[in-house]
Image: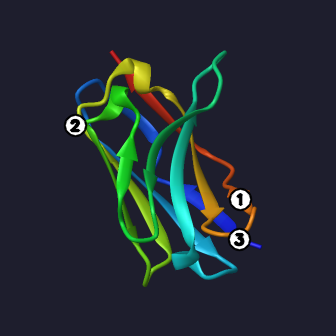
Amino acid sequence: QVQLVESGGGLVQAGGSLRLSCVASGSIFSRYAMNWYRQAPGKQRELVATIASGGITNYVDSVKGRFAISRDNAENTVYLQMNNLKPEDTAVYYCNARHNIVDMNYWGKGTLVTVSS
């Protein structure tokens, strides 16, 4: 069982920056790929960024060059640095942990990011 707690959301003007954090507990963090998803009002949840156990990252096209995902396995934490934020980035951002081998998948409760124009 993995517990995930996100923080760092808030209200920011367009062009601003925020850094989201997700602290994991309850299992061996390094055995999980870590992901950030987001869900905007009236839209489906979408995968924003992924970081594998070994550090390989991947991003949805709409955030490439603006967002950066990183992880600190010693601190059981994954980050999402968001720069040059746009109103369309407004959403609830969710942290997700997916085990590398077995079918185990965990979610945090989300943190709201609001970008004003």
Location of the N terminus by quadrant is: bottom right
Q: Which residue is mark 3?
A: 2
- Which image quarter: residue 98? bottom right
- Residue 41 is situated, as x and y percent measured from the top left of the image, at 63, 19
Task: Return the disc, 2 or 3, that comes first in the chain's sequence.
Answer: 3
Q: Are marks 2 and 1 in contact (CB under 8 Å)?
A: no
* Total labels drawn: 3
Numbered disc 1: secondary structure: strand
Vertically, is 84 above or below 35? above
Q: Which residue is mark 1?
A: 106
Q: CA distance from mark 2 to mark 1?
A: 27 Å
Vertically, is 113 above or below 36? above
Location of the C terminus by quadrant is: top left
Q: Is 73 situated left or right of 44 in this image?
A: left
Identify which residue is drawn at 35% across, 60% down.
Answer: 56
Q: Which residue is mark 2?
A: 65
Identify which residue is drawn at 67% across, 80% down.
Answer: 27
- Which image quarter: residue 84? top left
Q: Is 109 situated left or right of 13 in this image?
A: right
- Residue 21 is situated, as x and y percent measured from the top left of the image, at 46, 59
Q: CA distance from mark 2 to mark 3?
A: 30 Å
Task: Return the disc, 3 or 1, that comes first in the chain's sequence.
Answer: 3
The disc placed on residue 79 is: none
- Residue 116 is situated, as x and y percent measured from the top left of the image, at 37, 20
User: What amino acid type should be assigned to the residue bearing mark 2?
Assistant: Gly
Numbered disc 2: secondary structure: loop
Task: Return the disc, 2 or 1, that comes first in the chain's sequence.
Answer: 2
Q: Nearer the viewer, residue 32 or 86?
A: 32
Mark 3 surroundings: few (<14), some (14-19) or many (≥20) residues within 10 A: some
Q: Are marks 3 and 1 in contact (CB under 8 Å)?
A: yes
